[in-house]
Image (tube, grey):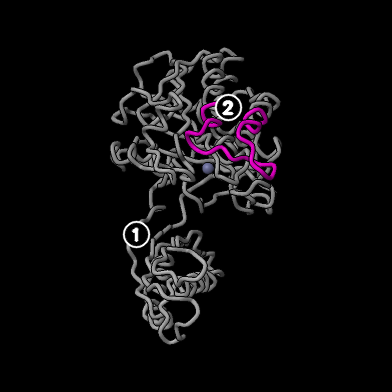
Amino acid sequence: MKPSNIRIDDKRYWDSLMQSAKIGPGSQGGMSRLALSDSDKEMRDLFVRWCKDAGCAVAIDRMGSIFARRKGSDDSLPPVLVGSHLDTQIHGGPFDGCAGVLAGLEVIRTLNDHGVQTLRPIEVVNWSNEEGARFTPAMMASAVFAGVTPLDWALARKDKDGIAFGDALKAIGYDGSTPMGGRKLDSYFELHIEQGPQLEEKGIPVGVVTGSFSIRGMNIRVGGENAHVGPTPMDRRRNALVGAAHLIVAVNEIGWGEHQARGKATSARIEVLPNLFGILPHHAQVTCDFRHPEVEGVERMVRALEARLPEIRHRSGCDVEIVERWQYGSEAFSRACIDLVRDTAKALGIPSMDILSEAGHDAFHITHVAPVAMIFTPCEKGISHNEKEWSKIEDLAPAANVLLHAVLARASR
Ligand SMILES: [Zn+2]
């Protein structure tokens, strides 16, 4: 394979990212562009305008995901899909998601600049609600697209103010009519910042994502009993917050136990009721997350926690039950697409390394309906889901060029 010498326009890609970064600013200099918020609408409107200016036809599906299509010379062939997400965390940065969507747009703009006509159509997608920061779960629209999650269930998911996803979509005018799924795709490529420190530490600009850590999540409910914080003797207290505290520390210790093997475990969310001064809480719910490069490793961590529950019950006097479990990360990326990304980097003279994804991405769901590959880029100190998240165009452009030529190769066959 010998790629042509066309390259993306670094300045235009960067300018688009910086225009996006101004929409939905966070309180600490980063981003806070929650799914289906007014700022999400503003960004979507800008993205749609950019795509139309680039000659694309734009379709919106029932989950509000945006598909911008550049025709192929045989437009009946399944398209090569490229994209990521334009929503951000509540305290997020300008590159998580946006780097991938806008790299897809830059691929199309570059092909236009050079008058390159591909055999297959190419589509750029912005998946709705990847972050799950406003509506849970994360990666919801790609899950519905791939038939992993039912549409009606997803449309009915509510944010903390009780607003349903479907109503929020209508409110911003992105309740599209394109039917969900059932559409043949040639392949799906997603460029994303690594969100970890490996590429930066090794000074390698392109991560060829070969798969994912195994990820297990669970909600654990801790049941205590309301009582006065003053007169109740210590040995009669059943404080749900204390039970949750024991649990959170146990999860953390289990993560440290697998640290050498690159395993990690944490609790990032707690709900406490009534959460008031003067009364022992009767209810707590803790969301726990376990990640490990090996399936056996993550299962070992989950078993370790299950083994600690009796002691936590005993020490806190509370009921402790796992009430919900989920898992992902075992989805297989496409060998052919992974090889294509690796070979393309090599042919372009860009250093790359194989890497596992340690975060969830829309690409995982799309593996159920198309061959998939992901390309990671370095980000400063590996910081992400933090308003300090940062990358430079020198970090992003090499991967964007690999994306360009991988997509071009795939769309030309
Ligand atoms: Zn992301």
Residue 71 relative to residue 351: left or right: left
Q: Which residue is drawn at 43% across and 58% down?
A: 214
Density class for disc 2 (Cα within 10 Å; few <14, some 14-19, many ≥20) is some
Q: Name the magenta segment's main secondary structure.
A: loop
User: Which percent across, then down, holds residue 249?
Assistant: 51, 73
Residue marked by disc 1: 325
Q: Is mark 2 on a helix, strand or loop?
A: loop
**Above or below, comparing residue 212 to residue 182 in the picture:** below
Residue marked by disc 2: 3
The disc, 2 or 1, on the residue closer to the chain's N-terminal end is: 2
Q: Which residue is drawn at 40% across and 84% down?
A: 236
Whether label 2 touches label 1, CB < 8 Å: no
**Above or below, comparing residue 162 to residue 19 in the picture:** below
- Is residue 1 inside the magenta stretch? no
Residue 406 relative to residue 165: left or right: right
Quarter of image, res 26: top right
- Is residue 34 inside the magenta stretch? yes
User: Which percent across, then down, holds residue 307?
Assistant: 37, 77
Residue 204 relative to residue 232: left or right: right
Is residue 366 visible in the rendered image? The answer is no
Is residue 165 visible in the rendered image? The answer is yes
